[in-house]
Amino acid sequence: MTHSDAAALQQVCILGSTGSVGTSTLDVMARHPGLYQVFALTAHSRVDELLAQCLQWQPRFAVMSDADAAARLRSRLQQAGSRTEVLAGSSALAEIAAHPEVDTVMGAIVGSAGLAPCLAAARSGKRLLLANKEALVVGGALFMRAVRSGGATLLPIDSEHSAIFQCLPEDATTWQQRIQRIVLTASGGPFRQRDPGTLGAVTPAEACSHPNWVMGRKISVDSATMMNKALEVIEARWLFDLAPEQIEVVIHPQSIIHSMVVCRDNSVLAQLGTPDMRVPIAYGLAWPRRIESGAQALDFTQLSALTFEAPDAARFPGLQLAWDTLRGPQGSTAVLNAANEEAVAAFLDGRIGFDQIHAVNADTLAAFVLPAGATESLDGLLELDAAARRCALQRIGSRSR
Ligand code: NAD
Ligand code: MG
C-alpha cells in the first residue's frame, strides 16, 4: 500500500468495540479494507475480547475504562509483541474520540457512560455514528448544540432512526418543511403476547431472547419492556428536531419495515430490509454512498405478511414515559434513563422482578427533585445522572426480593 492510499483510509475509532454493535461494525469494515482502518478500539472490562480484536486489527490505541483490565490487556499485548498502545480510564475514552487523527467515531457504548466520549467526538467535529441512544436521552439539547458548534456529521445507527434518515433528503434544512410526523416501528419483543399476569416470573434469559434481533443484554431487556422504544422516541426528538406529538410508535412484529416518515401531503416513505444492524452501520460508514453490508437481501416471496398493531399501554406502561418526560421539565429524560439503567441492572442480577422495572422508573421520576441548570453542562448532566441513580437504588432496595 502506498502512503497516499493509507492517507485516503478513514481512521475509525470504535467506542464499545466488544459489544454487539461494535463487533458488527468490525464485520462491515472487514469487507472494505481499502476504505477504513481501525485507529482505536475500546471496551469496559472484557480483556480477552479486546485482546483478540487488537491482535486482529492492530489499532494504534486500545482503551479500557476499567484500569485493572487495562493493565492486564497491556501486559498481554506486550507478551504478544503488539505495538498497540493501551490507555486506561473513562477520560481516555473522550481523549481518543477527539484524537486529531480520527475521522470517524462509532459510539457503541451502552448507557450514559457513552455520553462524555460521544460528546467529545461531536465537539471535535468528527463523523459520528451514534448507536448509543442513551447519550441523546441524557443530554439531547447539549449534545445537538455540540454537534452544530463542533461541525460534526451526526449519522444515526439505531435501525429506526437510520430508516428515517434514509427516507429523508441529504439536505437537512428541508426536513422541517417535509415531515408531518414519523412512525417508529417496534417488534413488541418477546412478551408481546404473553399473559401480563405472568411477567413477574420472567427470567433474564427469557427477557434477553429477542424474536428478531441479537443484541446486548441491556437493550434486550429494554426491548422486552418497550423502554427501548421510549428511549428511541426521545432520541428521535433530538435527531430530527421534532415535537413529541410528531412521533408515533406502532408494533410491527416482523421487523421488516424499520420506520416511516409521514410527509405533509400524507405520502408515507418507509425503509425495509432484513433485521441486521450491518445495514445502518454500512450506511453510517459510507454515507452518502452505499457499500456492501453483508446483510441478506429481503425475499418478498417468503414474507407471509406485514402486520401492525397499536402498543398495549397496560402491557407496556413504560412507553408513555417518553412523551411524559419530553413534556416535563428539562432533565426529566436523564432521570428516566438513569432509573431505567439501574432497574435493568437490578433485574439482570435478580434483585427485582421484570414487572418491577416500570415501577422503579415511575417512582424515581415522581420522587426525584430536578436541580436547576443541570442540563447546561456535561458535569451537570453527569451529577444529575449519578443523583438519579442513587434515588432509583433506594427504590430498588425497598423492593428487593
Ligand atoms: P453491548 O452490551 O453488546 O456492548 C456494549 C459495549 O460498551 C461493550 O463494548 C462494552 O465493553 C462497552 N461498555 C459497557 N459499559 C461501559 C462503560 N461503563 N464504559 C465504557 N464502555 C462500556 O451493547 P450493544 O447491544 O452493542 O449496544 C450498544 C449501544 O447501541 C446501546 O446504546 C444500544 O441501545 C445501541 N443499539 C444497539 C443495537 C443492537 O442491535 N445491539 C441496536 C440499536 C441500538
Ligand atoms: Mg432501535
Image (spheres, rainbow, N blue to C red):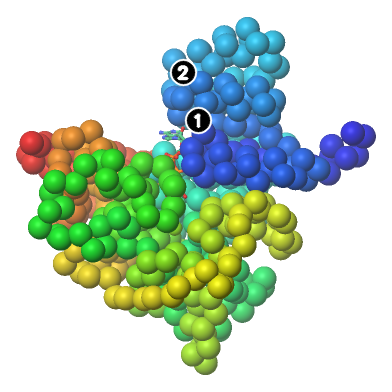
Which of these two is toward me, 38 or 31?
31
Position of residue 375 in the picture relative to residue 225 (left or right): right
The residue under label 1 is 43
Q: Residue at x 59, y 32 (%)?
A: 41
What is the distance, in whole Å, between disc 1 and disc 2 at their CAs?
9 Å
Rate crowding at label 2 as few (under 14), some (14 to 19) or many (20 or more) other CA atoms within 10 Å: some
Badge 2 element: helix
Q: Residue at x 25, y 67 (%)?
A: 320
Looking at marks 1 and 2 on the same chain, the residue that comes earlier in the sequence is marked by 1
Question: Could you tell me residue 291's position as x and y percent?
Answer: 72, 56
Position of residue 250 in the picture relative to residue 26 (left or right): left
Q: Residue at x 16, y 35 (%)?
A: 351
Pointer 1 residue Cβ closer than 8 Å to ligand 1: yes
Instruction: Check residue 69 in the rendering and tell me which mark sits there, or answer none.
Output: 2
Amino acid at dot 1: Ala
Amino acid at dot 2: Ala
Q: Residue at x 63, y 42 (%)?
A: 27
Instruction: Check residue 31 in the rendering and tell me which mark sits there, or answer none.
Output: none
